Amino acid sequence: MNFNSQYLTYVEYKQLGGKLDEVPFNVLELRARKKVDEMSQSRLKNLPTQIAEVKVCMYQLVEAINKNNTKKSKNIMSESTDGYSVSYGETETTEEIKQYYNIIKDYLSTCQLEDGTPYLYCGVMQ
């Protein structure tokens, strides 16, 4: 599987001190990238390179997501007694969502595109 347009590559992750193997890193990086894209209105998607703040933000998100995933067991999402079936899934807690939001906000709130648009801009500029 090819993971294109990563904001943080595996080599960069390792240089920052990451300890994950490549496959779990790629999956977590994609998940972290989706969170950044959601908060930035996908403004970073088409940038030719990412600045240091984005790289470190992604590193922190990958580490936080990994830590949260390893400390919790899978939750039962649905259960059926007819033929007995159990479906498991992972849900993010409110605290985890806040943690991810704060990481993104801490690193990217002062970053801007070349035209001056803030990465995390969501309102009307005057």
Image: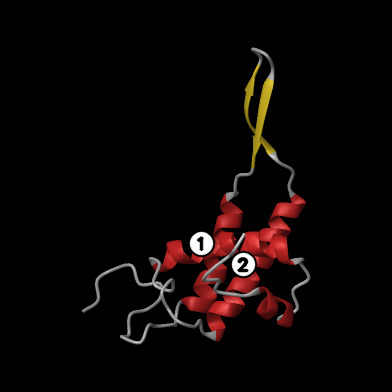
Residue 14 in which image quadrant = bottom right
- With 4 as the anchor, is 115 left or right in this view? left
Of residues 19 and 22, the one nearer the viewer is 22
Q: What is the image's colouring?
A: secondary structure
In the rendered image, the quadrant that contains the C terminus is bottom left
- With 7 as the anchor, is 82 left or right in this view? right
In the rendered image, the quadrant that contains the N terminus is bottom right
Q: Is residue 66 above or below residue 123?
A: above
Residue drawn at x 53%, y 75% as measured from the top left: 106
Q: Where is residue 81 drawn, in percent x and y?
A: 66, 14
Find disc 1 in the rendering and name its residue: 35
Q: Callout 1: few (<14), some (14-19), or many (20+) C-alpha neighbours within 10 Å?
A: some
Find disc 2 in the rendering and name its residue: 61
SS at badge 2: helix
Of residues 122 and 27, the one nearer the viewer is 27
Q: Where is residue 58 drawn, in percent x and y?
A: 59, 72
